[in-house]
Image: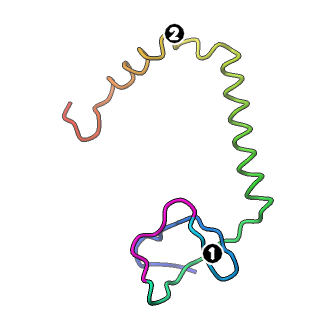
């Protein structure tokens, strides 16, 4: 199906029976007195939890390997590296 009217907004929710329970940010100013068209994609419980757990475990393992290796060799002083990195570009909304 094709939608040409504006940008679609995406929000996370749990469907219980015929009701949506919002997770995180809720849509602003939903019309309470009339229906609103939505598109719902069903994520299987297995797929959703496996993806969530798999990413977290993989990230934790990668960070642990990095820590075990002593960090990044070219970054002797992390605070100085951050200052140097930020100095290379103007901050948003500020004149250089």
Task: Say if the magenta span includes residue 69.
Answer: no
Percent across and percent down for residue 73 are 58, 11
Mark 1 vs 2, N-terminal side: 1
Quarter in which the C terminus is drawn: top left
Task: Give me the residue at 29% from left, 34% from top.
Answer: 91
Q: Which residue is mark 2?
A: 76
Q: Is residue 33 above or below residue 44?
A: below
Q: What is the spatial separation of the Cα atoms under label 1 and label 2, in whole angstroms? A: 49 Å
Q: Is residue 8 above or below residue 83?
A: below
Q: Quadrant of residue 23?
A: bottom right
- The secondary structure making up most of the magenta span is loop
What residue range appears in magenta? 23-31
Quarter in which the N terminus is drawn: bottom right
Task: Give me the residue at 73% from left, 37% from top.
Answer: 58
Q: Which residue is mark 1?
A: 40
Mark 2 Cα shell of 10 Å, populated few (<14), some (14-19), many (≥20)? few
Percent across and percent down for residue 72 are 59, 16
Percent across and percent down for residue 26 are 48, 66
Task: Give me the residue at 74% from left, 46% from top.
Answer: 53
């Amino acid at each position: 199906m094709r939608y040409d009217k504006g940008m679609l907004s995406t929000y996370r929710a749990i469907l219980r029976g015929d009701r949506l329970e919002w997770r995180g940010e809720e849509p602003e100013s939903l019309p309470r007195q009339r229906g609103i068209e939505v598109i719902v994609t069903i994520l299987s419980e297995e797929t959703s939890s496996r993806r969530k757990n798999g990413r977290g475990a993989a990230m934790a393992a990668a960070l642990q390997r990095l820590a075990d290796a002593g960090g990044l060799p070219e970054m002797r002083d992390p605070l100085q590296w951050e200052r140097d990195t930020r100095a290379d570009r103007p901050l948003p909304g500020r004149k250089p």
